[in-house]
Amino acid sequence: MENNIIEIKGVSKRYKIGRGDRYLALRDKLTYFMNPLNMFRKGKRKSPGEEFYALKDVNLNVRKGEIVGIIGRNGAGKTTLLKIISRITYPSGGEIKIYGRVASLLEVGTGFHPELTGRENVYFNGSILGMKKSEITRKFDEIVAFAEVEKFIDMPVKRYSSGMQVRLAFAVAAHLEPEILLIDEVLSVGDITFQKKSLGKMENVAREGRTVLFVSHNMGAVQRLCNRAVLLNNGLVVEDGDVNEVTEKYMSYGLNKAGERIWSEENSPGDDVVRLRRICVMNAKGEIKVEFNTHEGIFVSVEYAVLKNNYPLNTLLYFLDEEGITKFVSMDNLDSPWKDTVRPAGLYRCTCEVPPDLLNEGTIRINVIVTTSPYNLHARDSDVLVFKVIDDMSNSGVRGNYPREWPAAVVRPRLNWKVEMLNHGKG
Amino acid sequence: MPNITKNWDADNNVVSEKTYSRPVIIIRPPSGAFYLDLRELWSYRELAFFFVWRDIKIRYKQTIMGAMWAVFQPFFAMVVFTVFFGKLAKMPSDGIPYPVFVYVGLLLWNYFAFGLAHASNSMISNSNIIQKIYFPRLIIPLASSLIGLIDFAVASVILAMLMVYYSYVPNFSGLVYVPFLLLIAFFSSLGIGSILASLNVKYRDVQYIIPFFIQMMMFLTPVIYPASIVGSKYRWILSLNPMTAVIETARAAIFGNSRVDIHSLCISGAVSLFLFIFGVVYFRKTERYFADII
């Protein structure tokens, strides 16, 4: 017990389902009290809405210096757990004891204002993350150097590229010095080089003996960073132990192939602008499938409802491998009639064609994002689709008549070759 | 287990000094218990400063006129009121030039109303921060009420200029009242603002009520008229409003044309303190649900 830095005992979090509860109008409350019949019904005011447990009786002890990966599908309760530990929201039951200063990175760049300069944003952002002014001043040069934005630091952030913004935001967050650091998916930002740098920074944090709780869908990053992993499913802790064992278990049962996903109106990811409705993966004939040949075209189709006018939306698809490494990303802004134009309210379907002979053999996971370019995220979901690409060894693919196993490369594009004989004889 | 200190302080130094007993944060489901935790609030004082600083920076960056807006708004309001109430309606002003008279009222009223309006909407306008980061939420309405002090200072320059223009010599010793009057206005605007901010999170109707509420309040406060025109029978209604005594005292103290009514100033101070404590306690009690419902 002496070494525990976080003790979580029987924590649960209950939400009421049904949108009516979220934005209560004063009118409803007033009419309720105006009705004389209700005056005598004290305590019987239970709304008919269903209850939903985001976390159920979670017990977890974390020792000082441990780096714990928290994994699980979307909606498993990972973010809720971090939000409770960081006191953003409160549990409905149970108790948590935390021995030390906590900083949470649930999203980089919270509070960044486009009109303020990089310098001003560093100070404000650092301050809401819990740094003292003197602390920010001391680390300022280091933060700016880490983000590689020295030249632009006195420019308003709205002139930054989105990559620069993200780098600066991450740099501020990475220079916090709490005893306990809570991280939610922030490593998935920036380009590959910066992701590696961020991961390196996190490893340093870990080596300094600080405790880290790390939520991620990126199994590779979890395996590299953490020594222990906790798998959540439907609000319950289902596995807790060595990182390799837990992640392997997750991947084996988390990756049940799914060629289609349909969301009901209640649980559809999104905000008040965009709500995801359906996503599926098909072959050229429009048949939903979970296994494709390497030399087959693959069509990923996303359907979403746009609830408000005037948003120039972009749909992005991330193609990831089994370990969570992004192979590539594609965006629907290439379909010229809709390029940079507002999409009026309505239902949309965006279909992306992955040409034949591009993906290599293996499992492909799809993440989907709908944004207003480039800053506002409207809807996001990870691992929405999982399908397999297999090599049927036929001659029509990239392999031609090569008989052995094809190398495990990120992609397997069909490229043009030209073979010329330049000379006869000995050359 | 070693001793557990009850309060945990965000200040690094305090933590390291207390290594003999591990500081602990205990998170439990919210209970009905009264809680205020001023120590925690104090440890986040720098953040309040940063909120003020950010809002002022943003405001002046997005406008061409910048700081001039703090002056224009009360100045033109003064001009309009002088034309319609001073000249056309012949509103009495206790023997003081009407523009100076109304401007003093507007200065203090604007400080109160601006802080109130800002504080009331502050939870909604900062909802993205509230959903992602923990800090005592009260910092935000607190900062909103403080921002107006800067506008107040800037707009006061016009008052000095008006007095020079009308060659009106103020009673300088009366200026000692100003900090107290600002404190009463601050307590009242933060108190009411916190209650409305909290209600606004749950019932979005509140944001539509606020402008109307402020407008009505202004007519129930002697901003454009002197309290003396209200019959003694109905005076008590005015004095329930803490801003009445604030504005009346400001005029009496600065113009020196009547005695400062210490009695009603004390009542107004007590009312503002009550509003402040009630508002802050109510806010602290409800803030724990903000991230879930905002």
Image (spheres, grey):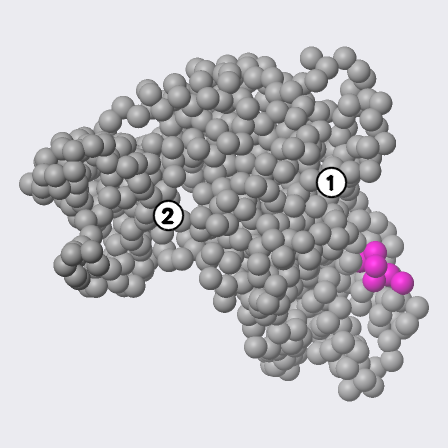
Query: Looking at the picture, which amino acid does disc 2 mark?
Result: His
Residue A398 placement (x, y as % from top left): 17, 43
Query: Looking at the picture, which amino acid does disc 1 mark?
Result: Leu
Residue A12 placement (x, y as % from top left): 51, 19
Image-based side of B157 in relation to A287, left or right: right
Q: Residue furthest right?
A: B173
Q: Residue furthest front?
A: A426
Q: Is residue B57 above or below residue A51?
A: below
Residue A262 placement (x, y as % from top left): 23, 33
Question: Going 84% across and 23% down the picture, which residue do you hit?
Answer: B20
Q: Residues within 10 Å of mark 1 (few under 14, many from 20)?
A: some
Name the one closer to the observer, A368 or B147: A368
Residue A212 placement (x, y as % from top left): 60, 31
Counting every numbered tag in the picture gives 2
Q: Is residue B119 visible?
A: no
Confirm whether the magenta stretch covers residue B267.
no
Q: Quadrant of residue B258?
A: bottom right
Instruction: Give the overall secondary structure of the magenta segment.
Output: helix
Name the one closer to the observer, B275 or A222: A222
User: The numbered mark 2 sits on a residue in which chain?
Assistant: A
Name the one closer to the observer, B192 or A418: A418
Rounded to the nearest angstrom, the CA distance separating label 1 from label 2 is: 33 Å
User: The numbered mark 1 sits on a residue in which chain?
Assistant: B
Name the one closer to the observer, A147 or A36: A147
User: To which residue does mark 2 refer?
Assistant: A378
Q: Residue furthest left?
A: A285
Question: Going 66% across and 73% down the picture, which residue do you hit?
Answer: B67
User: To which residue does mark 1 refer?
Assistant: B41
Task: Tell me the SS state at disc 1.
Answer: helix
Question: Going 48% across and 29% down the picture, which residue do you hit?
Answer: A223
Q: Range of the magenta residues?
A: B176-181
